[in-house]
């Protein structure tokens, strides 16, 4: 077996463990899940977790970090795609809502198990969240300055918009009446109303 095949197999095993951790944490919570639960879901021996990850907490950190960095990257891509605050907000909210609906299980774990992270990992994740919050607030402020948004409190508007997406993970289910895309369109309309977009 070549070194690249070894790496590929190890990467696949790490990914299986991360996916299994999401399922276990979503069903039982971080503290209610054991490493045995995770490896059982992954179809691996209990020892496998320590070959690929230092601890159960590290699994949560990896899931959380990946989710948050992906969200930040989506925000930044939406902002870079246009100079128009209205178009930016439409893209950001649609992407944010669709992503949270499609990945509702991992988003639920990411957003509701933060307290289980170590202080060091919490600090890192909170810093990424701070950047996301700042990007949203500044987008609304630019829209207000350009005269295309009419909102007296961009900071609170940003909190409201981000909370809409985050809370989606709590209630959305795949078998529900609305698709992620339909929710994305509805959330765009809500976002434009919240910021007082002038159309």
Image (cartoon, rainbow, N blue to C red):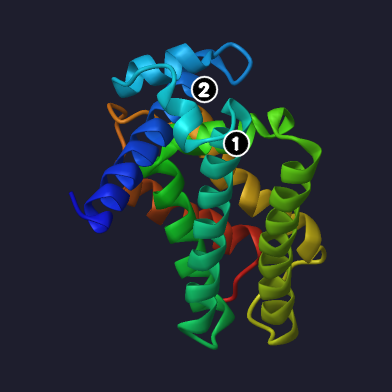
Is residue 187 among what the camera can see? yes
- Depth order, front residue of 106/75: 106
Query: Can you identify the residue that label 1 sits on?
Result: 58
Q: Residue at x 49, y 55 (%)?
A: 96
Q: Position of residue 157 (x, y in %)?
A: 72, 58
- Residue 192 - label: none
- Numbered marks: total: 2
Q: Position of residue 199 (x, y in %)?
A: 52, 76
Q: Which element carries disc 1, helix, strand or loop?
A: helix
Is residue 188 among what the camera can see? no
Q: Residues within 10 Å of mark 2 (few under 14, many from 20)?
A: many
Q: Is 2 on the left or on the right of 103, as rendered?
A: left
- Would you place residue 68 above or below residue 108 in this image? below
Q: Is 57 on the left or on the right of 11, as rendered?
A: right
Q: Are marks 2 and 1 in contact (CB under 8 Å)?
A: no
- Depth order, front residue of 94/151: 94
Label 2 – label 1 distance at C-alpha: 13 Å
Q: Residue at x 73, y 52 (%)?
A: 124
- Residue 25 - label: 2
Q: Quadrant of residue 44?
A: top left
């Amino acid at each position: 077996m070549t070194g690249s095949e070894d790496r590929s197999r190890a990467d696949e095993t790490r990914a299986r463990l991360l996916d299994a951790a999401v399922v276990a944490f979503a069903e039982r919570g971080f503290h209610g899940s054991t490493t045995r639960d995770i490896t059982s879901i992954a179809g691996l021996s209990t020892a496998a977790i320590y070959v690929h990850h230092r601890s159960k907490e590290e699994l949560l950190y990896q899931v959380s970090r990946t989710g948050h960095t992906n969200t930040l990257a989506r925000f930044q891509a939406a902002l870079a795609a246009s100079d128009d605050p209205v178009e930016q907000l439409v893209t950001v909210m649609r992407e944010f809502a669709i992503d949270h609906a499609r990945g509702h299980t991992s988003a639920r774990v990411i957003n509701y198990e933060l307290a289980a992270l170590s202080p060091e990992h919490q600090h890192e994740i909170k810093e990424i969240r701070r950047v996301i919050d700042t990007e949203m607030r500044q987008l609304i402020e630019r829209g207000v300055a350009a005269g295309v948004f009419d909102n007296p409190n961009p900071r609170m508007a940003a909190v409201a918009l981000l909370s809409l997406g985050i809370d989606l993970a709590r209630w959305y289910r795949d078998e529900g009446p609305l698709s992620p895309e339909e929710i994305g369109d509805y959330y765009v309309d809500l976002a434009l109303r919240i910021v007082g977009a002038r159309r």
